[in-house]
Amino acid sequence: ILDYTQYYLDLPKANAMGRANWDTEYSLLDYYNLKDINAKSLHELADRLTQGNDNAFP
């Protein structure tokens, strides 16, 4: 995996417009300031999140 991009859909807006417009929510690399996605970097991210040392996870 090179990156992960999360998309979202504003469903009320899509229903009103009659079409779906998917927008980017975030990129895993950019949002969590990762250099790559591998077992080590994901483990370190999990540690940061569970220890409360990351501003991206209130």
Image (spheres, rainbow, N blue to C red):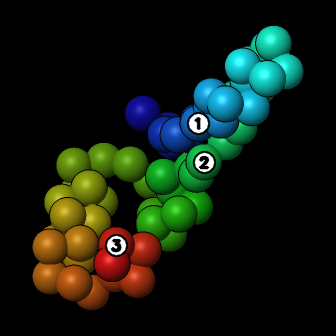
Residue that appears at 73% across and 24% down = 14
Q: CA distance from mark 2 to mark 1?
A: 6 Å
Q: Amino acid at mark 1?
A: Tyr
Name which residue type carries label 2. Answer: Glu
Classify 54 as above or below 49: below
* Residue 11 percent location from the top left of the image: 62, 28
Q: Is residue 53 above or below residue 11?
A: below
Q: Residue under circle 3?
A: 57
- CA gap between label 3 and label 2 equals 15 Å
Q: Quadrant of the N terminus?
A: top left
- Rendered view: 9 above or below 39: above
- Tell which circle, 2 or 1, labels the residue nearer the N-terminal end: 1
State the residue lying farthest toward the bottom: 53
Give residue 38's position: percent from left, percent from top: 30, 47
Whether residue 6 is visible:
yes
- Residue under pointer 2: 25
Residue 32 picture quarter = bottom left
Task: Point out the tag, 3 or 2, that comes first from the N-terminus.
Answer: 2
Task: Inspect the image, locate mark 3, and give the three-letter code of the amino acid beneath it.
Answer: Phe
Residue at numbered disc 1: 8
Element class at badge 1: strand
Q: Nearer the viewer, mark 3 or mark 1?
A: 1
